[in-house]
Image (cartoon, helix red, strand yellow):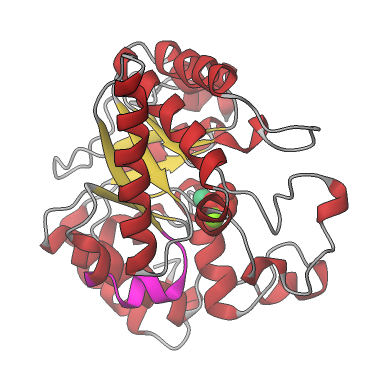
């Protein structure tokens, strides 16, 4: 099967009805650009930067981060790289001892909340990202947004990071700013965010966790973690539809994007950009090559309106 899939490596990801689909890679370190390019990913849709921060004594300085981001940007040879600001907390603790500090870490100080509570740390990352953007196309993606105030704080700190770089005459480039939609509040109140961002990326892993109140790393409730729950599908569908209506690029970067059994549904809901682990790209592309989005649209609508979406998925 792997061999069969490798034959479509260089086939453009276009549906039967001519819709061009963007297939992007999720990476966790700069060297992951190699497997991404090996399957013809057209960019990095999610660079998780946590590897620079986790399990170490001290935070990475600007030079170390700059080197890592440059390595990823240069590794993609001019293709866009979406760098996510650090998502520390909950399932991604800084170090082991910080793991049990709080009763509900997934609802606590994680991702952008932690970054905004440590502005010196966040400014360091922002400067490193801005400098890396002088070497190629860089997008900056912000995780776990829920409040408009957080957007304003991020923008103020980005401006401050530029001012700091100007003060030392450092070279930096432009970045497009994106929001992860992974808290139900952000999906439900997407209008708060639409005009403030250049693009959106749906993080289904956390969106499912928070919509269903299922801890994504708790084995005892793993059987209730359901990507096809009607509430989850409704949030994913409305986010895609609202972004499209406003001409804002939207992607899915959670596991749902790399699940080939979900590809037809996401296409039917209007998704045209998928970001996933490189090992899943060809299986998803195979589904795309066989799909006709005009036919999938009505079926996808039926699926999301159904009381038992899973029963319709094989149709
Ligand atoms: C997600 O939540 O879907 C996501 C892509 O981010 P992470 O899995 O790193 O939390
Ligand atoms: Mg997430």
To which quarter of the image does residue 41 belong?
top left
Q: Is residue 92 above or below residue 140?
A: below
Question: Can you say which quadrant of the picture contains the C terminus?
Answer: bottom left
Q: Residue at x 21, y 54 (%)?
A: 293
Q: Is residue 196 above or below residue 172?
A: below
Quick one: 25 or 180, which is closer to the camera? Answer: 180
Quick one: 197 or 154, which is closer to the camera? Answer: 154
Q: Which residues are magenta?
A: 181-191
Q: Tell me if residue 186 is in the magenta stretch.
A: yes
Q: Quadrant of ligand 2?
A: bottom right
Q: Tell me if residue 153 is in the magenta stretch.
A: no
Looking at the picture, how far across and down is residue 36, in whole percent?
A: 48, 23
To which quarter of the image does residue 267 belong?
bottom left
Q: Residue at x 79, y 36 (%)?
A: 55
To which quarter of the image does residue 70 belong?
top left
Mark yes or no: residue 289 visible. Answer: no
Looking at the picture, how far across and down is residue 218, in whole percent?
A: 78, 67
Quick one: 270 or 52, which is closer to the camera? Answer: 52
* For residue 110, side relative to residue 238 (left or right): right
Question: Can you say which quadrant of the picture contains the N terminus?
Answer: top right
* For residue 196, side relative to residue 75 (left or right): left
Quick one: 162 or 49, which is closer to the camera? Answer: 162
């Amino acid at each position: 099967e792997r061999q069969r899939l490798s034959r479509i490596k260089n086939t453009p990801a276009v549906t039967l009805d001519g819709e061009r689909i963007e297939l992007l890679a999720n990476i966790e370190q700069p060297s992951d650009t190699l497997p991404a390019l090996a399957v013809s990913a057209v960019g990095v849709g999610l660079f998780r930067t946590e590897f620079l921060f986790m399990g170490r004594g001290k935070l990475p300085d600007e030079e170390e981060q700059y080197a890592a981001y440059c390595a990823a940007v240069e590794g993609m040879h001019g293709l866009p790289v979406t760098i996510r600001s650090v998502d520390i907390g909950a399932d991604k603790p800084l170090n082991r001892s910080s793991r049990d500090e709080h009763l509900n870490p997934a609802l606590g100080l994680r991702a952008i909340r932690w970054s905004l509570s440590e502005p010196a740390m966040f400014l360091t990352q922002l400067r490193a990202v801005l400098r890396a953007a002088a070497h190629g196309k860089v997008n900056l993606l912000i995780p776990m947004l829920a409040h408009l105030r957080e957007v304003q704080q991020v923008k103020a700190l980005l401006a401050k990071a530029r001012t700091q770089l100007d003060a030392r005459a450092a070279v930096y480039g432009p970045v497009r700013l994106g929001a992860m939609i992974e808290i139900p509040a952000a999906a439900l109140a997407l209008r708060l965010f639409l005009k403030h961002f250049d693009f959106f990326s749906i993080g289904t892993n956390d969106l499912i966790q928070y919509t269903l109140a299922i801890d994504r790393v708790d084995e005892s409730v793993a059987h209730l973690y359901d990507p096809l729950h009607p509430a989850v599908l409704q949030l994913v569908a409305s986010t895609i539809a609202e972004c499209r209506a406003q001409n804002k690029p939207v992607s899915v970067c959670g596991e749902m994007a790399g699940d080939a059994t979900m590809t037809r549904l996401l296409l039917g809901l209007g998704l045209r950009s998928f970001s996933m682990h490189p090992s899943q790209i060809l299986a998803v592309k195979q589904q795309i090559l066989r799909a006709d989005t005009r036919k999938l649209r009505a079926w996808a609508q039926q699926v999301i309106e159904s009381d038992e979406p899973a029963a319709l998925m094989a149709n």
